[in-house]
Image (cartoon, rainbow, N blue to C red):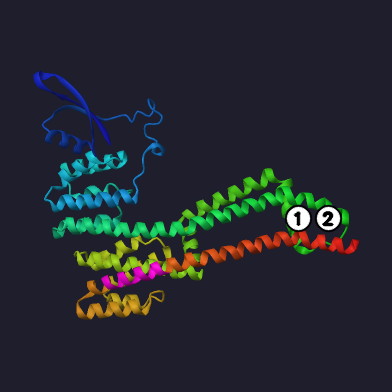
């Protein structure tokens, strides 16, 4: 929040200024630490009436994962050099080119100066720092290894970012081709097929079923285009909104696990993140139940999120991690057996680290397989679509030419 204050300067002169703080008390504390004598202080009007573009997030530069990766590496370097958290965040805020991140880092620095811990200050920025990120920082504070934690977080986010970008790039080309194909098909149904309708009607020949269906679709686009396009757009919008609800997202995630290629991909994403996150948090002294809850919170697929929460509840009741994993049918035996060995030998962290590396390689292989399957599947699908459209036109024309002959 932004506060406007009035203070007394030299020779009793009144000085006015603004300060950004999480609360009124925090604002007063920050001003007092700077040696400012506060006369009055009030929450400042946001000024929306003066500048209609002032607070629109649309015009603010977004904070990307790459920004957080670079920032985390910079923090790790400064901590390793012995720079305090307050000074590090002040310095990075001043030097950062992203104004939005600059504001957020300044807010974190102000909170630290106000007397709260770094992890607590980061908690107030949930749009930037995830639950996993914050708890790792808290573990670093408790162990005194903040520089190592921030360096790990940078590496972790960098790997996660690369994987996400790889999947997005794999889907960009087929999405464009399929979108273009549907646009061409709609154009054919709207402008080309109607011209054939009169010809077929004059011939009086019995039309094949495929031609009847295509002509029916063409009539819909031609006669009801003013309604059909808005209806399709509205249906797509409703589906998008529904997919963002808890029930909708659960249904979409459940469906993705029924598609063979996506099922393998989703499973390996879960196994890789589960192994890596658990290894990292357990190695930094985070209790196993809390580590499981944090891991569950950052898993995107709702089905696997439920699995992680169930495992956490079973461990809370006194079961070993390997036993809890064994009772979940979607968890492969190799993970169960390796975790059991880790528990027996006291090397669970080392075992989980090796599993994370193994599943990272498996995940890369799954992504490459998916990329390899997309192109032939797309060619076959487009070929079928074009084949149906062409046969709908050529079959009746062939029948008409036979009758003439």
Question: In 3D space, how far apart are the residues under numbered discs 2 and 1 (Cα atoms)?
Answer: 10 Å
Q: Nearer the viewer, residue 391 or 89?
A: 391
Residue 391 coordinates in the image, percent (x, y): 74, 62
**Placement of 90 over or under 168, stated as above or below:** above
Q: Which residues are magenta?
A: 353-365
Q: Nearer the viewer, mark 2 or mark 1?
A: 2
Residue situated furthest front in the rendering: 405
- Please identify the quarter of the rendering in which residue 333 is found: bottom left
Residue 327 showing in the rendered view: yes
Judged left or right of residue 403, residue 249 is left
Label 1 element class: helix
> Residue at 48% of width from left, 58% of height from top?
171
Residue 354 falls inside the magenta stretch: yes
Pointer 2 and pointer 1: residues touching (CB < 8 Å)?
yes
- The tag on residue 215 is 1
Residue holding disc 2: 200
Judged left or right of residue 77, residue 399 is right
């Amino acid at each position: 929040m932004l506060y406007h204050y009035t203070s007394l300067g030299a020779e009793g002169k009144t000085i006015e200024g603004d300060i950004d703080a999480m609360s009124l008390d925090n604002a007063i504390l920050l001003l007092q630490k700077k040696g400012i004598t506060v006369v009055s202080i009030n929450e400042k009007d946001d000024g929306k009436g003066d500048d209609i573009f002032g607070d629109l997030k649309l015009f603010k530069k977004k904070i990307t994962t790459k920004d957080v990766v670079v920032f985390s590496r910079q923090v790790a370097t400064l901590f390793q050099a012995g720079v305090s958290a307050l000074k590090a965040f002040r310095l990075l805020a001043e030097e950062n080119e992203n104004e939005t991140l600059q504001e957020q880092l300044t807010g974190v620095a102000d909170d630290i100066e106000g007397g709260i811990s770094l992890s607590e200050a980061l908690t107030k920025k949930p749009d930037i720092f995830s639950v996993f990120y914050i708890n790792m920082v808290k573990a670093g504070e408790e162990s005194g290894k903040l520089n190592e934690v921030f360096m790990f977080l940078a590496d972790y986010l960098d790997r996660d970012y690369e994987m996400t970008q790889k999947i997005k790039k794999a889907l960009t080309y087929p999405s464009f081709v399929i979108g273009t194909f549907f646009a061409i098909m709609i154009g054919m149904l709207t402008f080309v097929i109607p011209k054939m309708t009169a010809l077929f009607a004059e011939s009086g020949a019995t039309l094949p079923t495929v031609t009847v269906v295509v002509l029916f679709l063409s009539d819909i686009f031609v006669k009801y285009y003013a309604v059909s396009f808005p209806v399709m757009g509205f249906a797509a919008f409703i589906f998008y909104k529904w997919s963002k609800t808890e029930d909708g997202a659960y249904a979409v995630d459940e469906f993705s696990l029924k598609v063979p290629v996506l099922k393998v991909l989703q499973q390996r994403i879960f196994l890789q993140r589960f192994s890596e996150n658990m290894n990292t948090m357990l190695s930094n002294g985070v209790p196993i139940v809390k580590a499981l809850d944090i891991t569950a919170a950052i898993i995107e697929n709702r089905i696997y999120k439920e699995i992680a929460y169930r495992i956490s509840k079973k461990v809370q009741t006194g079961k070993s991690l390997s036993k809890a994993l064994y009772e979940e049918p979607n968890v492969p035996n190799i993970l169960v057996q390796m975790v059991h060995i880790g528990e027996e030998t006291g090397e669970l962290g080392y075992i989980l680290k090796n599993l994370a590396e193994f599943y990272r390689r498996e995940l890369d292989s799954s992504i490459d397989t998916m990329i390899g399957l997309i192109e032939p599947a797309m060619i076959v699908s487009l070929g079928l679509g074009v084949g149906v459209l062409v046969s709908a036109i050529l079959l009746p024309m062939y029948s008409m030419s036979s009758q003439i002959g």
